[in-house]
Each structure stands twice: as structure tokens, then as C-alpha cells.
């Protein structure tokens, strides 16, 4: 049996705020043999490995943390990509695109050959666009490439609804769908508290103003946290760790994840069944007319961004070829 089969490994590319918090969450709730951290900032990488290592010497975690390179990461069971620039206060996720797309492209070149069984989990923003390009750049089957998408937004939605309804968040089933960004929308018509539709559970509160306030809270939560502390890390660390668990345990949980939507021509979040092979299948969701229109608008916006990014990548290739020819002459 090869060493690969004896160990379960999760590689985290980028060990800044999000990557290191995810690693810490994976130590506290162990689900794999080792966590491999990769980051071009050598001093930061060493320091994170030592600091996280210290957290493994007490308690009952079996998970070890080590530094690795991109080639090691390419052989992991799950490859989580948190590498990239983060939002500055007030900056939109989409404005990170150019910087993070170039990082993504260099990561895939450095990781080749990637294990055919690896699941790629995109966290870096803009996550839906990067998930779209990761499918193409990785060469992996479509089902094995997914993004955290609106999982975090949906958790925030659950949290605020739990407060309003005065019930435990676990009793609420509620999804934010579409883009992990400004064009996201809440699938109000499918929310349930226990088995009761929201209209039955909260009849007096469910006004247009209530919905608008909740949507603004869910959409703006990250910006408010980033303005105060420079990043968001704990929420996404927990979400990404749970997704890793669903994959390694083949749990078949239904979560809102970003994956390719053939009929919309982009990656965005819809409910999916998740397991060891990645996206096992899309779980159909019934949307009302308003939600369908919101989904269309969201997809249209994402397709336009993809088109612009494709032009940029093509221009880069032309430039790289011209430079190669120049050096060769
Ligand atoms: N999807 C979500 O819900 C969600 C939530 C929070 C943050 N994010 C995103 O996650 C990303 C990371 O955020 P952060 O706060 O950790 O940023 P950070 O700046 O603290 O860390 C990013 C790390 O990536 C590293 N990196 C750069 N190029 C790399 C490469 N080629 N290979 C490996 N590592 C590389 C950097 O050196 C840096 O240490 C951002 O894009 C942020 O917007 C997403």
C-alpha cells in the first residue's frame, strides 16, 4: 500500500489569516492525518507551522501540521486554496480578481501533476470566479472542484434568523444562493424553522422591511468585520473545515456550495449533496419568480466578469509567448 493511502491529508495553500485559522480548526476537530501548509512567505510559513504544532502537543488531536511545497499539495486528498490578496476595507470581492487569478494560475502550474482523486476547495475571493477558472486550470473532473460560495453567508443568515425567531440556529434551514458577493440573494420561499415554512413560523415579522434588513445584514457582514479587524477568519475557518469533513467522511450533507451550473454558464452557489467525490449531485430547489429573476441577474453579472477575465488571461498568454520568442531570438 502506498504512503498516500495510509494517510489522509489536507493541503492549505496560503497560511495567512484564513489558512492558519482553518489549520487550527482542523487540529481542534481532527479529521485527517496531516495538514500541509504552503506559502511563499517562508518566515511566515515556518512560524505558522511551529505555532500550530505547539497546539498539537496537548489535547487529543492526532493531526500533524507540516510545511510543504506546491507539488506536495497537489497529492493531498483535499487542496484548499486560501492563497491570495484579501479585501481592503471597503473593497469589493470582485476587485480582487486580477491579482488572485494570476496567483491561482501560478499555483496550478506549480502543483502539477495533481492527484486525480484530489478535491479542490476554493476559498480565496472572488470565490465563484476563481472556482470557474480552477476547473479549467486544474484539469480535474468538474465534480471535484468547488468553492465555499455562500456557505458562510448562509450560516450568518441562520444566525440572524435564530435570534429573530428565538430558536436554536440548528433548527433553521435557510440558504443564501448565487454569488458570494453583492448579487447574492436569499431563497426566502424555501426557509423552514423546524418543519414550518417561515411564513407560518414568523407570520407577524415577515415584512418587506424585515427581509431587506436581513439581506443587508447577510450581504454586509464581512465588510463590517473587515473594517474593524482587517479580515474575517473564524467563520470561514469553521465552514471550510466542515466542508473538508463532509468530503472525507463522504457524509452526503446538503450545503450551498459554488460549483459549475451548465445552464447558467458560471459557478455560483446552489444546494448540493457533498461527499468523497466532491459534488455528488445538485439538489433541486424551488425558487419563486422573484428569486428566479435574482438568480438570472446574478449569473449574468458573473458571466460578464468571466468574459473580462478570459480576455485578460488570453492577453497574458500572448505577452508570455512574445517574451519567450524575444528571449529565444
Ligand atoms: N470565501 C469566503 O467566504 C472567504 C472568507 C474570508 C476570506 N476569504 C478570502 O480568502 C483569501 C485569504 O484571506 P486572508 O485573510 O487569509 O489573506 P492573507 O493575506 O492573510 O493570506 C493570504 C496568504 O496567501 C499567500 N499566498 C500568496 N500567493 C501564494 C501562492 N502562490 N501559494 C501559496 N500561498 C500564497 C500569501 O503569502 C498570504 O500569506 C482572500 O482572498 C479573502 O478574500 C474568503
Image (cartoon, rainbow, N blue to C red):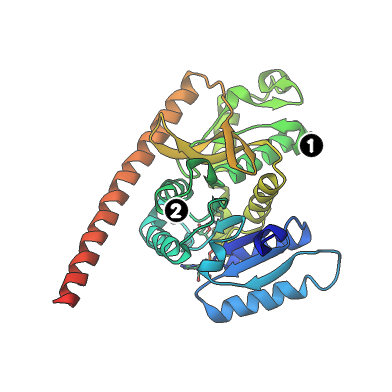
User: Does ligand 1 reach within 8 Å of label 1's beta carbon?
Assistant: no
Residue 127 at what x, y percent from top left?
A: 48, 50
Q: Is residue 191 above or below residue 258?
A: above
Quadrant assignment, res 315: bottom left
User: Does ligand 1 reach within 8 Å of label 2's beta carbon?
Assistant: no
Q: Secondary structure at mark 2?
A: helix
**Disc ID at residue 49:** none
User: Which residue is the extreme one toward the bottom?
Assistant: 43
User: Which residue is the extreme one toward the front?
Assistant: 1
Which circle's residue, 1 or 2, is located before the other in the chain? 2
Horizontal side, residue 111 vs residue 318: left or right: right
Nearest the viewer among 46 and 72 is 72
Q: Residues within 10 Å of mark 2 (few under 14, many from 20)?
A: many
Q: Residues within 10 Å of mark 1 (few under 14, many from 20)?
A: some
* Total number of numbered discs in the rendering: 2
Q: Is residue 18 visible?
A: no
Q: Is residue 200 above or below residue 235?
A: above
**Disc ID at residue 168:** 1
**Disc ID at residue 138:** 2
Residue 174 at what x, y percent from top left?
A: 65, 32
Q: Secondary structure at mark 1?
A: loop
Nearest the viewer among 252 and 112 is 112
Question: What is the C-alpha distance between the residues marked 1 and 2?
Answer: 40 Å
Q: Is residue 102 visible?
A: yes
Residue 314 at what x, y percent from top left?
A: 25, 54
Discs 1/2, front: 2
Mark 1 and mark 2 residues within 8 Å of each other at the beta carbon: no
Q: Is residue 118 above or below residue 176?
A: below
> On the rendered image, what quadrant is the C terminus found in?
bottom left
User: Which residue is the extreme one toward the right?
Assistant: 59
Identified at 65% across, 61% down, the residue is: 4
Q: Is residue 287 above or below residue 8?
A: above
Amino acid at each position: 500500500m502506498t504512503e498516500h493511502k495510509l494517510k489522509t491529508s489536507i493541503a492549505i495553500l496560503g497560511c495567512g489569516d484564513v489558512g492558519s485559522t482553518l489549520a487550527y480548526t482542523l487540529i481542534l476537530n481532527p479529521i485527517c492525518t496531516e495538514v500541509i501548509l504552503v506559502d511563499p512567505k517562508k518566515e511566515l510559513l515556518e512560524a505558522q507551522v511551529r505555532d500550530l504544532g505547539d497546539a498539537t502537543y496537548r489535547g487529543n488531536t492526532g493531526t500533524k501540521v507540516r510545511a510543504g511545497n506546491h507539488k506536495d499539495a497537489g497529492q493531498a486528498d483535499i487542496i484548499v486554496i486560501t492563497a491570495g490578496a484579501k479585501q481592503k476595507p471597503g473593497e469589493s470581492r470582485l476587485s480582487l480578481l486580477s491579482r488572485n487569478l494570476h496567483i491561482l494560475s501560478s499555483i496550478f502550474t506549480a502543483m502539477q501533476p495533481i492527484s486525480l482523486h484530489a478535491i479542490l476547495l476554493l476559498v480565496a475571493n472572488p470565490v465563484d470566479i476563481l472556482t470557474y477558472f480552477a476547473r479549467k486550470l486544474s484539469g480535474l473532473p468538474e465534480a471535484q472542484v468547488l468553492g465555499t460560495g455562500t456557505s458562510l453567508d448562509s450560516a450568518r443568515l441562520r444566525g440572524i434568523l435564530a435570534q429573530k425567531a428565538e430558536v436554536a440556529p440548528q433548527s433553521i434551514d435557510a440558504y443564501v444562493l448565487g454569488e458570494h458577493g453583492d448579487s447574492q440573494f436569499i431563497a426566502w420561499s424555501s426557509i423552514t424553522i423546524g418543519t414550518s415554512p417561515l411564513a407560518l413560523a414568523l407570520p407577524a415579522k415577515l415584512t418587506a422591511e424585515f427581509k431587506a434588513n436581513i439581506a443587508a445584514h447577510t450581504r454586509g457582514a464581512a465588510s463590517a468585520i473587515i473594517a474593524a479587524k482587517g479580515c474575517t477568519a473564524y467563520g470561514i475557518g469553521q465552514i471550510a473545515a466542515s466542508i473538508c469533513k463532509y468530503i472525507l467522511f463522504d457524509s452526503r450533507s446538503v450545503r450551498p456550495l459554488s460549483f459549475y451550473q451548465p445552464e447558467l454558464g458560471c459557478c455560483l452557489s446552489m444546494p448540493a449533496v457533498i461527499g468523497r467525490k466532491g459534488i455528488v449531485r445538485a439538489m433541486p430547489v424551488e425558487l419563486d419568480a422573484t428569486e428566479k429573476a435574482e438568480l438570472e441577474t446574478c449569473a449574468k453579472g458573473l458571466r460578464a466578469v468571466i468574459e473580462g477575465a478570459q480576455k485578460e488571461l488570453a492577453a497574458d498568454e500572448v505577452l508570455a509567448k512574445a517574451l519567450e520568442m524575444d528571449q529565444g531570438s
